[in-house]
Amino acid sequence: MTTPRATPIQASDEQLAAISWDAKGLVAAIVQEEGTGRVLMLGWMNEEALHKTLDEGRMVFWSRSRQELWRKGDTSGDRQWIREAFYDCDGDALLFVVEQEGRGACHTGERSCFFRAFGEGTGNTEHHKQPDP
């Protein structure tokens, strides 16, 4: 198995200026798995996290609880390597397509943080489960 490579992304000043930061200087960052299209997680970025993510080609977030930057996978090894990056029409949400390394994105051990469904009988069914690696 080959180790994933970082893919830095060159964003223009105009593109970066289009980001609409909230009152706390943050923007939502959705992370989607390359190949499957599965949404893996949602995190938050400040301006520094966005710049580091684009420059390093690896997901860097802002921890709202710890008030510090964190690189996804530094502790767990479950790193996320950027393949594509987008911003929405209003500039208030980001979307990153990544190659997920390791067992998954969720700190619980699930592949995706979105493994719980609303409604009786809709959650934890086989079609919602990620196949074992």
Image (cartoon, rainbow, N blue to C red):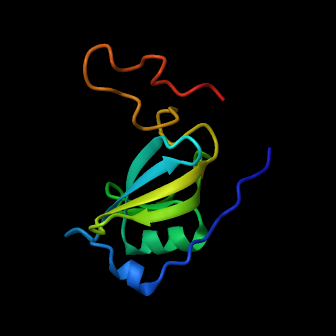
For image coordinates 44% across by 64% down, the residue present is 86
The answer to which quarter of the image holds residue 48 is bottom left
Vertical side of 109 occupied by 120: above or below: above
Q: Residue furthest front?
A: 89
Q: Quadrant of the N terminus?
A: top right
Horizontal and vertical percent for residue 65? Answer: 32, 54
Above or below 3: residue 53: below
Total marks placed: 0
Image coordinates for residue 114, horizontal then vertical, percent: 39, 35
Q: Residue furthest left?
A: 23
Q: Residue at x 60, y 37 (%)?
A: 103
Q: Residue furthest right?
A: 1
Apparent side of residue 113 relative to residue 27 in the rendered image (left or right): right
Q: Is residue 47 rendered to the left or right of residue 84?
A: left
Which quadrant does the C terminus fall into?
top right
Q: Nearer the viewer, residue 29 or 24?
A: 29
Specify the farthest residue to the bottom: 13
Q: x%, y% of residue 72? A: 53, 54
Q: Residue at the spot x=46%, y=43% of the render? A: 40
Residue 131 pos. (x, y %): 59, 25
Quadrant position of residue 7: bottom right
